[in-house]
Each structure stands twice: as C-alpha cells, then as structure tokens.
C-alpha cells in the first residue's frame, strides 16, 4: 500500500529571513583538524602558506560563512600570545584538554589568513577557564584595534597592518562541564562573563558576544544554568550557546532518526529560558541562539579514550575521526531542517567540526581529500537554504520509537529566495520501509516549476565513504512534477530530498 503526505507552502507562512551564519562550522586545535588537515606544508596540494588547496576547495564549495576557533575545550587553556609572532619563537605546550602537543605553528594570524582564503569569517572563542578579563581585552585589542596601542602595535610588528576585524566572540566554552579546565558554577561564570563582556564592548562596541549555555541537555543544572548566567550577562551579550551531539550506540535507527525532536525541544526550552530572563529584567531585546556545536559523534569514542590515556602528548594524533554512515547523513539533514525551522531565534550555528575531526571533510596525510556522507546535506542546505524560511503545514503519517511517540514519517521545511525567485523544499523520509508520495500545494508560487530533485539514498544504512569510493553521494531524481498549484514527488524510503523550483 502506498503512503502519502501532503503539505501547504505559502509566502505568508514566514518564519524569518535566515541569517547565513546558521551554516557556520568549527575548527579546533584538536586531532588532525589543523595539522595535516587544513595545513600541511610540503603536501603536493599545499599553497605558499602551507595550506592544502584541495581542502580549501571543498570548504569553499560549502560556502561556510563563519568558523568558530580555536575551540572547544582547547580554548580553556589557550594562551593566545603563544600563537602570534615569529613562528620559530613560539613555544610548544602540553595541551591538556586533548592531552596532545601543541606546537603553535598555526596561530591567530595564520588562521585569519586561511579563513579569508576560503571566504569565511572567524567566530573567536576566548579563554575564561584559566584566564580572564584582562587577557580577553588584550586579545580583542590585538585583533581589532587599528594602531597606536600596545597590542595593536604588537600585531603590526608581526606583519599584520590591518585589524582582523573579528565581530563575533564566544565568552568561553562549556564552562559548566566538569571536564573543562577552570569550570565554573553558574554564579562564578555569570559574573566573570558579565565583566568580560562589559570591558570588551568598551573596546569595540560593534562586536557580538555569545554567553555560554549548558554543555548539553543532560547537565544537572540545565536549564537553570542559562537562567542564572543570563541574569548577569543579559545587558551585555547578544547570544547564548547551545551544544548537542547525537549517537546511535544501540543500533536503533528508528530511534536515532527521531533525535531531531530532542533538538527541537532543546531549542524551545532555551528560547523560553531566555525570554523568562528578558521578562524578569524588563528587557527590550531578545537573546538569540548560537547553536555553535552540533553533529553526530560517537563512532570513535573508545579509540579516542585509549589514545589520550595511553599515548598522550602526540602532535596532531588521530582523534574524533568518526566515519559517518548514510543514516548519520539522514540525521544531519533532519538537524538542519530543525535549525531552519527555528531561524527566527537560531541566528548562528556551527557544524562541529569541519576537517578530520567529526567532520564532513577528511584528508589522507600525504594523499587526497574526500567527503563524508554528512557533507552533502550540509552542502545542500548552505547552498540552497539562503532566504526566507517558510513553515509548511504538513500532514504526514507517524510512528513510535523506543524513546519517542508521534514521530512524523516525513519532516520538511521550505526556503524562499525572493530575489532569485527560487523555492527549495528540504524533506527527509525517515520511514525505513516505504516510499511516500508527497503532494505540496504551492498556490502562492504561481509560475514556479521544478529545476531539479536531488536525493541522497542508499540501500545500506551503514554505508560509508572513503578516499577510494563515494558509496553515498547525491543524484538527480526524475518524475517530480508541478501540475497547476501542486508539486508531486516520490520520497524514497530513508532519503534526504532537495526539491528545487524556480519561476519560469
């Protein structure tokens, strides 16, 4: 028996104009993200600065608007002064978060040069674990002040005449986590973040600041952490951070693909908490959300723990190198749909991470670069998800899983690029057995016709890509039509779909 879903998309069902920074990513000094990832002097594909051009090309194809740096847990013991100046004079340090050796061969100015080369911007994280207000102010002065002061002139002496102009700054990382160096209570962090934010905005009032939220929804203080810390930081910050990773250790695909509902609940809870603080403080502004770490992460945990415990202090060891399956790509697609649906308040997000470390892009140390399964939903959303998010009215069959009830078989959102007169429907069929015929009423988009229907599907849910074979890659699907005001498409079982329409 055929299964059906129907949907209405209308120009008036606006969620928000999407901030392009929702398609951001993350590079941490962790594992092979930097060394043998984005940077490997002597590699056949390296440019004059040692950056791998094959990696740069794949990053540019993703059109990543902002990249969080340099951590992550790494930032809570980061001494930024070690990462600038003559490379030969930079000290090597024991990096405590990941028990690795940090050479500081790549630092602030080199990374700024790389982000410019890939047409991106930096979201800079500051160390509020082992350092504090003065160090944050000194770093901001180094990066953004034109000249004539101690730290701006220091930057100039390092050969960087123009300010880096970094506009987005994270006030620490996961500061409630007991694994974090310099972890804080909510009161401790709230006061420190408030005073740091206040001082930084005196130096550069144009910057945007992100206050640390809970490390994840499983933290015992969530969401009280957000409520307490925002009471201190509300007047000075613009965002609160969210972090969420999902895994499938029980090998229950149906339950795994329902986890986007957990992400949706997480976002709604943080929004409610932010609005509670706004009401309590009689505030005028909304605190927006920066979902600056999100992904699937669980495949490499055992090996990573063994490396850090038994073989510490290596330079750029292979850590967090999850090999992503096709079902992982489906969940990444569902998470992207969830972010787009909340784009009125989620104004920034970072797929964690970008290269080698829980990443869509992988490199062989002396070989090529290649794309994992999760690269493709991210590519499609970043490329075609620019414009106005539209809330569809969706009627879909549902199913229950071990952990969730009323899970829709079809999950979808639409994005209207008003200027280009293009409409994109993103849809996942998470039914593992049956294809579903989707009919979509697009009456307010008269004259629009199908440009292409991209689909990511594979008979093997555990299929992975490698340097030698792309078992999971998008293809064009025929048969999607527009008849009058109705789009009709077949959503194959367990598939990610991108239906692109444009005005004739």
Image (cartoon, rainbow, N blue to C red):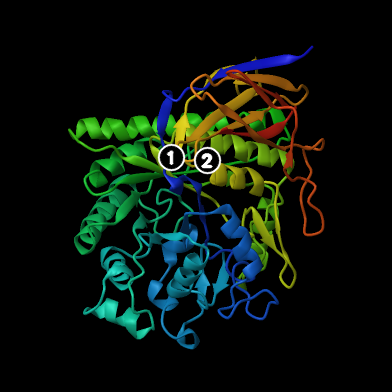
Residue assigned mark 1: 18
Element type where label 1 sits in the image: loop
Q: Give the numbered dot on residue 268.
A: none
Image check: 346 left or right of 362? Answer: left
> Residue 1, how many percent across, how many down?
79, 11
> Is the residue 235 above or below the residue 161 in the image?
above
> Is the residue 29 above or below the residue 240 in the image?
below
Are discs 2 and 1 less than 8 Å apart at CB?
yes
The image quarter containing residue 410 is top right
- At 67% from the left edge and 57% from the top edge, which residue is drawn? 321
Q: Quadrant of the C terminus?
A: top right
Element type where label 2 sits in the image: loop
> Residue 257, how many percent across, how many down?
65, 31
> Residue 191, how many percent across, how many down?
25, 51
- Label 1 Cα neighbours within 10 Å, binned few <14 / some 14-19 / many ≥20: many
Q: Give the numbered dot on residue 385.
A: 2
> Residue 468, how many percent across, how many down?
82, 58
């Amino acid at each position: 028996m055929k299964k059906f879903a129907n949907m209405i998309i209308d120009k008036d069902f606006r969620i928000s104009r999407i901030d392009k920074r929702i398609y951001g990513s993350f590079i941490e000094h962790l594992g092979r993200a930097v060394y043998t990832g984005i940077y490997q002097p002597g590699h056949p594909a390296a440019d004059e600065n040692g950056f791998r051009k094959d990696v740069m090309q794949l990053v540019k194809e993703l059109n990543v608007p902002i990249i969080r740096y340099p951590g992550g847990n790494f930032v809570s013991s980061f001494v930024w002064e070690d990462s600038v100046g003559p490379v030969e004079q930079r000290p090597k340090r024991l990096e405590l978060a990941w028990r690795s050796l940090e050479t500081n061969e790549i630092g602030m100015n080199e990374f700024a040069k790389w982000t410019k080369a890939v047409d991106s911007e930096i979201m800079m994280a500051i160390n509020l674990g082992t350092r504090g207000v003065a160090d944050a102010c000194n770093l901001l002065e180094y990066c953004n002040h034109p000249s004539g002061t101690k730290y701006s002139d220091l930057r100039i002496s390092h050969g960087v005449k123009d300010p880096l102009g970094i506009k987005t700054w994270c006030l620490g990382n996961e500061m409630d986590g007991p694994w974090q160096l310099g972890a804080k209570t909510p009161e401790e962090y709230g006061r420190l973040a408030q005073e740091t934010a206040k001082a930084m905005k005196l130096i550069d009032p144009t910057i945007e600041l992100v206050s640390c939220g809970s490390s994840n929804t499983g933290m015992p203080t969530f969401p009280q952490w957000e409520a307490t810390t925002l009471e201190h930081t509300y007047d000075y910050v613009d965002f609160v951070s969210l972090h969420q990773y999902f895994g499938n250790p029980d090998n229950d695909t149906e339950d795994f693909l329902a986890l986007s509902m957990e992400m949706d609940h997480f976002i709604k809870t943080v929004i409610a908490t932010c609005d509670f603080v706004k009401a309590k403080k009689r505030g005028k502004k909304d605190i927006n959300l920066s979902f600056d770490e999100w992904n699937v992460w669980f495949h490499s945990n055992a090996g990573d723990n063994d490396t850090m415990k038994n073989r510490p202090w290596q330079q750029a060891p292979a850590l967090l190198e999850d090999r992503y399956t096709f079902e992982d790509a489906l969940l990444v697609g569902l998470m992207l749909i969830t972010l787009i649906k909340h784009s009125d308040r989620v104004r920034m997000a970072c797929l964690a991470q970008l290269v080698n470390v829980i990443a869509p892009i992988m490199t062989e140390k002396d070989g090529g670069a290649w794309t994992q399964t999760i690269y493709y939903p991210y590519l499609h959303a970043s490329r075609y998800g620019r414009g106005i998010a539209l809330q569809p009215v969706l009627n879909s069959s549902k199913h229950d899983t071990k952990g969730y009830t009323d899970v829709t078989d079809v999950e979808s959102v639409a994005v209207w690029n008003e200027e280009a007169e293009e409409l994109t429907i993103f849809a996942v069929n998470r039914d593992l057995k049956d294809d579903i015929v989707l009919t979509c009423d697009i009456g307010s988009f008269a004259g629009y016709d199908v440009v292409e229907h991209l689909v990511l599907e594979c008979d093997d849910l555990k299929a992975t890509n490698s340097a030698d074979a792309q078992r999971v890659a998008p293809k064009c699907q025929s048969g999607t039509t527009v008849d009058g005001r109705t789009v009709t498409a077949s959503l194959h079982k367990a598939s990610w779909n991108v239906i692109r329409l444009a005005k004739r």
